[in-house]
Image (cartoon, helix red, strand yellow):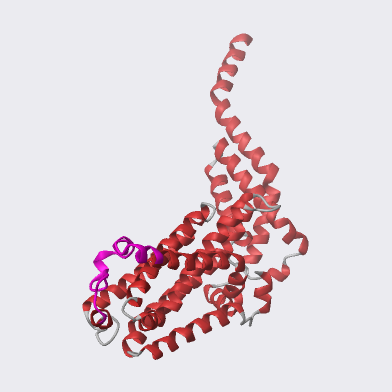
Amino acid sequence: MAERVTGWFSRAERTVAPAAQASLRSDRFRLEREGEWRRLEDIVSRMEKGRLRRVSDEDLLALPALYRNAASSLAIAREMSLDVATLDYLEALVQRAWFQVYGPRASLLIWFRRFLGGGWGASVRAMKMDIAIALVTMVAGVLVGWLLVRSNPDWYYALVPTQFADARVPGASRKTLEATIFGNQGQSGLAMFSAFLFSNNAQVSILAFALGFAFGLPTLMLLVQNTATLGAMLWLYDGQGLLFDFSGWIAVHGTTELYAILLAGAAGVHIGRAMAFPGEQSVLTAAAAAGRRSAQVMAGVVLMLIVAAMLEAFARQLVDDTFGRLAIGAAMLVFWTGYLFFWRRDRHVGEAA
């Protein structure tokens, strides 16, 4: 009789064992770590309520480690398939802690004010070598475009898209070329060409930055290709003695657009150079730091392209003489250079960058 009872209890234990073991495993897992979770939750709750002064230095120093432990606990809990309540609690806690450890510290308005108050300029100044490399590359691209079409005018059609060349082709008379830059800004052909310049430069800026991960080489090639188009057109107008007038036509918005391309190219080169020459840091660490700085520069590039579009849409339409256009272009060039390289209102931001 005793053997029968013992056998019955053994079968019952085997039946309930999996569920009981899973529950026991979940309880043990939670009890071993719950103290750290509660401490992390308390710190995060006070920070979310804006009570940072009530958080001790000890808790602030422990916050990153507590966050990492909670994230590790969440990963283990998912692997062990613990109870839903524990998983939901950990997921919410880790998400809240992430925003306190890695999330933005200021609102968009505060960030934008700091950005314009020195953050953008500080990031640009940190890329002086990369800007110099991009500038030399762009000048070389203009020379390459000029020399190619001078040696063989057929190169012009390869460098300048035919759908936007309209009357601007080798062999065009001075009167024809002059008519494209004076007095007819409202014509559809010129508007189309202007739209092409803006969209092309915006695409080039984005690509120049995005291709920086390949050690910056595609970025430099893209800069050469883009500025070679400008070199080809400069040659075309120079052939009819209109180089000065064409430069004024381009300068109104070109000094801002080309400046934006220069900074975008420098941002791409900056990332590529950080990956190729990380120094004492790991490649990922160096690339991450360069990426953050470059992203801030690219935010400014977008702003510059918007300003260039407004200049192209209004200033060039209203000003129809070369000296006036050159004055606008020169003023914008001086403004951007002074603002980015010499004006340092927010010294704290500049030093931090």
Task: Classify the position of the N terminus by image quarter.
Answer: top right
User: 76 or 160: which is nearer to us?
Assistant: 160
Q: Residue furthest front?
A: 151
The picture places residue 119, in percent across and down from the top left corner, at 60, 74
Q: Which residue is drawn at 31% across and 73% down?
A: 195
Vertical order, 321 against 202 (above or below): below
Task: Looking at the picture, tell me which residue is in the foreground, 82 or 330.
Answer: 330
Image coords of residue 313 (percent x, y): 33, 82
Q: In this view, does 250 lie to the left or right of 164?
A: right
Whether the magenta-drawn stretch holds residue 156 is answered as yes
At a point 45% along the width and 78% down the height, the residue shown is 255
Image: 20 above or below 289: above
- Which quarter shows the C terminus? bottom right
187 or 301: which is nearer to us? 187
Is residue 315 found inside the magenta-colored segment of the image?
no
Image coordinates of residue 182 in percent, x first then y, are: 28, 86
Q: Give the total of numbered labels.
A: 0
In this rendering, position of residue 133 left or right of residue 225: right
> Height in image: 350 above or below 276?
below
What's the residue at 66%, 38% (across, down)? 28
* Whole-percent x, y for residue 310 in the image: 37, 81
The quarter holding residue 201 reads: bottom left
Q: Residue at x 65, y 74 (%)?
A: 349
Based on the displayed image, in which of its 4 quarters is residue 81 positioned? top right
What residue range appears in magenta? 147-174
